[in-house]
Image (spheres, grey):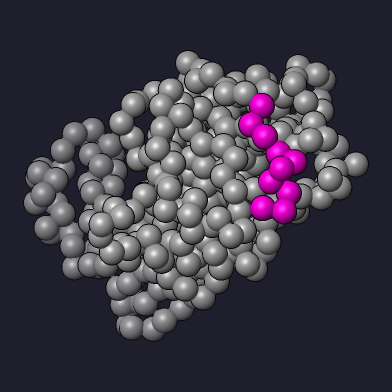
Amino acid sequence: MPTITIMLWNTQHLNDQNQKLPMSEAYEEKLDALVTAACDFSPDIIALFEVGTTARPNNQLVKDLSGTYELKASLDQDGGKKKNTTLGAMVFVANDIAGKFHEPYKVPLGSKGNRSTLLLQAEGGQLFAFCHANAHGPTAFEQVTDDIRFVGGNADLVFFGGDLNHQPGDSLAEVKVTNGNTMLRCLPGTCGFTHVSIRSSLSLAKAMYQEVCRNTGGTPGMSESTFINNCMGTDVAWGDLAIPSLLDYAFIAEKCRWKSACEASVQVTTLKFENKQLDHVYYFQKDKVYSQVQRIYRGKKLRSDHFPVIYEIEYP
């Protein structure tokens, strides 16, 4: 297995469909994005987060991908800190090579984790680990570090990736594992972001109120609601903010060569009704208010805060 292509995507609640009801519009749009990426990039492995539910894989998705991909690993009921959740995870392998991969064992949920890490092992011994940390701040990366070190000593080559919910600049650039190997942080290329949060400009007004409170050492002589009412339409326009972040990345054994891409873009309509395409993080302006913000992936509107990420890994 000299090279392998892996697609990661946090689909955000791509849930199973009720067989007695028509397909939901959200499911059809997300399936279309998934199939488009699969056709365009032909990934050997597809790892999806927030899909199905823990202990209940998305059977409709298994059926829809059965012509080209086979489900090889998914979280079981004990794979999450909370039993009832819509934050499942599933790993598929292309049909023509699916027999060369298996799930070697279940990774126990560590004290820092919210979701277990899924493993996939190739017949050559290469181990791939996929984690949807589902946490914010330092706790997300603490789980990642713990799990990398737990599985890192059991195989010569390890791939570790997912929705880490932790900006890479605040995480380690490398992680040492027990067998002496080093895992390097590998960021998706192309646009510099993998996630876009669309927020109402009301959130900007609230942030301004909190800033005034910090500067004055208390309240600025009025309640938050009064401040916002006075602020909106003057200091802050009505509309939406587009906030990019880079939350989906990987740690790859340093002996591997790799490249990656995330073809993410955002279409905005300005307050003057001008349309613009933001396809690199540098084009985003902090606190810029737009009349409309839409996430775009490969020319189509995307129903997920996260964009698909493609990694190609070459083994020595």
Span shown in magenta: 94-104
Q: Is residue 243 left or right of residue 265?
A: left
Tell me where residue 103 appears, x and y as whole percent. Answer: 64, 31
Count of numbered circles on the image: 0
Q: Quadrant of residue 19?
A: bottom left
Give the residue drawn at x 48%, y 54%.
63
Tell me where residue 250 appears, x and y as whole percent. Answer: 65, 41
Examine the structure image and report whether residue 270 is included in the region drawn in magenta: no
Tell me where residue 85 appears, x and y as whole percent. Answer: 33, 35
Give the residue drawn at x 54%, y 19%.
108
Tell me where residue 143 appears, x and y as whole percent. Answer: 54, 25
Q: Is residue 253 above or below residue 29?
A: above
Is there any visible trace of residue 41 in the rendered image? yes
Give the residue drawn at x 82%, y 20%.
180
Give the quarter of the figure containing the N terminus.
top right
Q: Quadrant of residue 155?
A: top right
Q: Is residue 274 above or below residue 304?
A: below
Which of 299 and 38 lies nearest the eye of the viewer?
38
Is there any visible trace of residue 166 in the rendered image? no
Give the residue drawn at x 69%, y 46%.
98
Q: Is residue 8 left or right of residue 304?
A: right
Which of 99 and 225 lies nearest the eye of the viewer?
99
Q: Quadrant of residue 235?
A: bottom left
Examine the structure image and report whether residue 101 is included in the region drawn in magenta: yes
Give the quarter of the figure containing the C terminus.
top right
